[in-house]
Image (cartoon, helix red, strand yellow):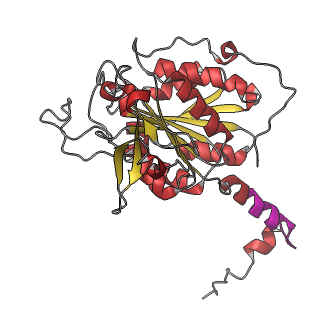
């Protein structure tokens, strides 16, 4: 059931989506940028403000609903997917956005997240990934790199981290994307694409925690080296990166592995072209790590039937059957029995 979009809708501005609540994130937190981009994009989506609903779990990111002038629900640790699913089933016309963090979504909430993704409920999941537990003051999270020294791993964590986008693909997500808090225009493009997708849109947003994990992504996102470290994805275009004088591309080896090659007349025809509908390519791109460039943008997008559509279709079908709504007939049906008196 599509979200109701009204072409005669009053024109909103960013200010219309800013609440009167004091923002209580640490100065310099990457969450400020994400909040700003969401508030900028929402007025463009053609959705009445009263049809937006922001659902969050527990963590720094989960304060988000208070700062949006929309309906919102600050729920419990790891269970935001369950609340968001129920909300969408009860009122499919709502534009539901789940806000979560790497700890909330991938630790206590991991089971809820994967089932939301496989069911393909038509809502957006924004996962703020700062590779640390920020609200509880700096313990390692499910995305912290191996060897990370934190308050809960003073000798370095021995856990192998999750790759959130690869996890989402493994759970059969129909839309997977990655962006960064400081990539303003790219982040807005991803948010618009997530909204337009019919199904669960999973968006990983790298977010800097300048108090407990400052500079976690600097080696990749630093402006001077960004061209060499980031692969910006565009559907139907070659997978190339680097500056114009030193352009590189990705090609597939006979062993079905990606390799970096300079783009010239001898390699130009071998450079892979991004296909958002190809799950094999999506898995390769989701797992790229240095010395490869990190893939940013829409990694995978392949619409399929939404969960709430299937559920409401079954309800409509059941109501149309003869005898529907007869509770007495249901209670006395073939799956009941009588216990004889002794």
Q: Where does residue 146 sit, x and y in percent of width and height?
A: 21, 41
Residue at the (29%, 45%) spot, across then down: 161
Position of residue 170 relative to residue 33, above or below, is below
Q: Report if residue 195 is visible in the image.
A: yes
Q: Where does residue 186 sit, x and y in percent of width and height?
A: 54, 28
Observer-nearest of 157 and 136: 157
Q: How many marks?
A: 0
- Seen in the image, is 58 located left or right of residue 214? right
Observer-nearest of 76 and 107: 107
Question: Would residue 314 be counted in the magenta stretch?
Answer: yes
Q: Report if residue 77 is visible in the image.
A: no
Residue at the (71%, 46%) spot, across then down: 90
Residue at the (26%, 39%) spot, across then down: 145
Start-end of magenta stretch: 312-324
| Dominant secondary-structure state across the stretch colored magenta | helix
Report the quarter where the C terminus lies: bottom right
Q: Where does residue 72 sit, x and y in percent of width and height?
A: 62, 29
Observer-nearest of 133 and 8: 8
Q: Where does residue 31 sit, x and y in percent of width and height?
A: 46, 22
User: Where on the picture, by quarter, is residue 141?
Assistant: top left
Which residue lies most toward the left here?
A: 155
Position of residue 107 relative to residue 325, above or below, is above
């Amino acid at each position: 059931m599509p979200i109701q979009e009204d072409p005669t809708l009053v024109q909103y501005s960013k200010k219309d989506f800013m609440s009167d609540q004091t923002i209580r994130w640490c100065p310099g937190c990457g969450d400020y940028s994400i909040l700003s981009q969401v508030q900028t994009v929402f007025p463009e989506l053609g959705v009445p403000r009263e049809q937006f609903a922001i659902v969050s779990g527990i963590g720094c990111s989960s304060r988000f609903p208070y700062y949006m002038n929309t309906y919102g629900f600050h729920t419990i640790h790891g269970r935001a997917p369950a609340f968001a699913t129920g909300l969408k089933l009860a009122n499919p016309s709502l534009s539901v956005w789940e806000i979560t963090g790497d700890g909330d979504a991938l630790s206590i909430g991991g089971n809820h997240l994967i089932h939301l993704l496989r069911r393909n409920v038509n809502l957006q999941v924004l996962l703020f990934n700062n590779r640390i537990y920020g609200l509880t003051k700096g313990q390692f999270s499910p995305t912290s790199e191996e060897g990370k020294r934190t308050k809960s791993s003073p000798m370095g964590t021995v856990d192998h981290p999750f790759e959130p986008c690869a996890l989402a693909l493994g759970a059969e997500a129909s839309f997977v994307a990655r962006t960064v808090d400081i990539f303003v225009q790219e982040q807005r493009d991803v948010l618009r694409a997530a909204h337009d997708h019919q199904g669960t849109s999973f968006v990983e947003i790298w977010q800097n925690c300048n108090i407990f994990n400052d500079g976690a992504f600097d080696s990749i996102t630093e402006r001077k080296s960004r061209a060499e470290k980031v692969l910006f994805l565009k559907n139907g275009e070659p997978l190339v990166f680097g500056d114009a004088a030193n352009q590189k591309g990705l090609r597939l080896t006979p062993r079905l592995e990606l390799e970096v090659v300079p783009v010239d007349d001898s390699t130009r025809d071998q450079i892979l072209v991004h296909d958002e509908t190809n799950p094999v390519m999506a898995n390769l791109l989701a797992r790229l790590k240095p010395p490869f460039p990190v893939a940013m943008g829409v990694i995978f997008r392949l619409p399929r039937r939404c969960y709430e559509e299937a559920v409401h279709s079954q309800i409509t079908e059941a109501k149309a059957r003869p005898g529907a709504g007869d509770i007495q007939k249901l209670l006395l049906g073939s799956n009941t029995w009588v216990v004889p008196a002794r």
